[in-house]
Image (tube, grey):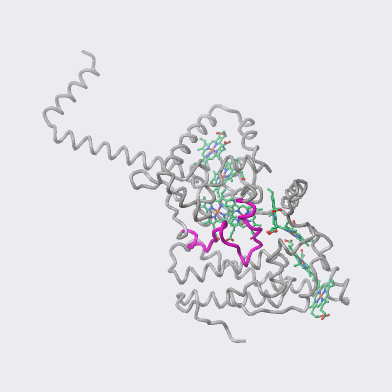
Amino acid sequence: MSKLAKLFRGIGSFIKGHPFISLLIFIAALIACTGITYELMHYTSSPEFCRKCHPNEGVGPLAEYHTWSNNVHAANGVECIDCHSSSPGAWGYMKAKMGGLYDLFAELFISKEAKLAKLSRFEGNPKESAALVGQNVCLHCHSDKVNIDNRKAHVMSFAGVAMRQIDRVVNPEFRNIFGLRDIITERSSYTSDPNHSLHVVENGALCADCHIKVSHSGSYYSNIDMQTCFDCHEIKRSEGKKPAENDNCVICHATQVSVQAGVAAQSFGVEDVVWEMASNDCMDCHENAFDRPSRESCENCHEEGYAELKDMFQENFDEQLVKADAFWSSHLKDRRQLTRSKREIFNSYEQLLNILKNDGSRGIHNSGYTDKIFEHLAVLEEEFTDGGESVGEGSETPE
Ligand code: HEC
Ligand code: HEC
Ligand code: HEC
Ligand code: HEC
Ligand code: HEC
Ligand code: HEC
Ligand code: HEC
Ligand code: HEC
């Protein structure tokens, strides 16, 4: 008799002789295996694991961990595996894990050149981008309707255990944590929202048409390029549609318009500020859409010395921005643990800060107003530190 047969025989008679103990051992082994599998699944889904084969610094192929780690999604706990699967839910997760096996195979058997070539095909290609990460994945977190539809259509967890964050996302609760809008149904008064519903739902635009490299551009927020708006609009014009004219700055630049008019932060309780230069058109200063007016351009309309005034406004702005940015980033990590009132203050803080950043002129469009917004940020900072009890009670500093 072979050794193996002897072993099986021995096990067989042990089970017969000790059925109860055998059952216990079996259950314990099963639990241990599942535990190991669970841990293994978890570990092989972590950004740290992905980094082992996607380790480069900078931007571009193989630097995905690095770019992700600098991005708004990473800062708010959205991980690789939340975006990189065919769909939310348990099955999407399993499919992603199987795709991972192919990654492993490719790591061992394809050349470095072939790997880089494969990973380069997303460069400036929205269709490839959308094929890799579907809109239903993005919209699971960024819209309520798609979130509900997905949760109806897919089994979201294995026996109640969701393996990753996206499978636990329930909207609108999730959006509310971050003060995010439902991009399909809500327009924003404080960003230059191009009307997502018109583009995405009515005209079939892809997220990546405008937000290419949403997680891998190397910057914190997605870097939208005005030229991509113009390129597609040019094509659509030839198809008989009527998108915004390129010279119609105000239809797209809602943030700059409302900052210049001194009303951008009205809904946050910031006092309006009418600026002497409010009546200037965008194109009085900007020669064309891509022109950033120089310091000398001030002296086209004003006497000498106004170039220095531009520097002064911008330095004053930058100084305040550094402080506000420091407060914001120091609390970013614990935003999920904040009490509701603190969270509301924090989200307002972030949105106001984004108005200041998105405007892009560093105070020039209305320096009196940007100063006012900074003052309001200081008030929010105090309320936040005091525990957030006085939110909404009109504790603005009297002027
Ligand atoms: C063992 C090494 C290895 C690990 C670990 C690894 N990858 Fe990859 N990955 C590769 C290789 C090699 C390729 C290129 C070949 C291919 O398409 O699979 C790749 C390609 C990709 C692609 C592009 C797929 C495509 O269709 O071209 C994505 C997305 C990706 N990996 C994400 C991840 C994520 C997310 C993780 C962590 C959960 C991860 N990878 C972990 C080696 C790895
Ligand atoms: C698991 C949920 C989740 C998924 C999936 C997800 N996001 Fe996000 N997204 C977030 C969170 C959370 C924020 C951060 C909100 C904040 O800090 O204001 C965010 C912020 C953003 C922003 C605003 C910041 C910026 O860059 O301007 C954009 C745009 C965005 N996501 C687009 C996308 C796109 C496109 C996809 C799909 C490729 C996607 N998101 C997938 C949760 C998600
Ligand atoms: C036509 C171009 C375009 C398309 C297509 C598009 N976006 Fe946007 N998106 C923008 C612009 C422009 C902004 C505003 C940026 C700003 O002012 O900060 C924005 C803002 C956002 C924000 C931030 C919202 C907030 O509350 O501040 C999210 C999230 C977002 N987009 C997600 C998506 C997702 C997901 C898709 C695909 C379903 C998508 N976008 C498709 C252009 C687009
Ligand atoms: C917010 C969603 C999101 C997150 C989070 C995310 N990615 Fe991506 N990733 C994308 C999208 C969308 C693309 C398609 C190309 C593009 O637009 O950047 C992509 C492309 C890739 C590619 C293809 C090659 C390339 O460079 O374009 C790899 C590999 C990859 N991601 C790996 C990762 C890894 C590893 C992580 C985590 C460390 C991660 N991604 C986190 C959305 C995401
Ligand atoms: C994929 C193609 C595509 C891209 C990219 C695109 N647009 Fe559009 N845009 C359209 C179409 C189509 C229309 C609608 C024209 C119509 O209804 O006749 C439109 C219309 C508009 C309008 C007019 C809306 C109104 O209410 O009249 C604005 C504003 C606009 N786009 C802003 C933007 C901005 C900002 C970007 C870049 C961030 C952008 N678009 C990128 C296709 C695009
Ligand atoms: C179709 C919509 C649209 C129109 C029309 C438009 N812009 Fe833009 N513009 C954008 C978007 C989107 C961005 C990128 C915003 C961002 O980075 O958040 C941008 C960026 C810019 C930038 C800075 C970045 C760069 O790419 O150089 C300037 C300056 C600018 N616009 C000025 C103008 C002026 C002036 C006009 C009118 C002559 C105008 N724009 C018309 C949508 C538009
Ligand atoms: C009084 C002159 C003036 C007027 C009027 C004006 N701008 Fe500006 N704008 C500037 C200056 C100066 C800058 C900062 C340029 C710099 O320092 O790089 C700027 C910056 C910008 C930027 C940011 C560019 C970047 O680098 O991201 C955008 C976008 C912009 N303006 C759009 C507009 C729009 C849209 C209007 C009309 C609502 C407008 N501007 C009205 C002078 C003006
Ligand atoms: C297209 C012409 C034009 C340009 C370019 C221009 N301004 Fe003005 N500015 C005006 C007008 C008109 C007023 C309001 C009338 C007045 O009080 O002189 C004004 C008012 C002002 C005021 C408040 C009143 C005063 O004269 O002190 C300041 C400050 C100012 N501008 C600074 C600047 C700076 C800095 C720049 C360059 C970034 C600039 N302006 C570029 C036309 C312009």
Q: Is residue 138 left or right of residue 361?
A: left
Q: Nearer the viewer, residue 199 or 307?
A: 199
Would you identify the image quadrant in which residue 30 lies?
top left
Q: Is residue 106 above or below residue 325?
A: above
Principal secondary structure, stretch drawn in magenta: loop
Residue depicted at 53% across the width and 51% down the height: 139
- On the image, the x and y values in percent for residue 331 come to 51, 65
Residue depicted at 67% across the width and 74% down the height: 370
- On the image, the x and y values in percent for residue 24 come to 19, 38
- On the image, the x and y values in percent for residue 82 come to 49, 47
Q: Is residue 344 left or right of residue 315?
A: left
> Which region shows up in magenta?
174-201
Q: Quadrant of the C terminus?
A: bottom right
Does the magenta-highlighted stretch encompass residue 200?
yes
Q: Quadrant of ligand 5?
A: bottom right
- On the image, the x and y values in percent for residue 104 come to 50, 32
Q: Is residue 366 left or right of residue 111?
A: right
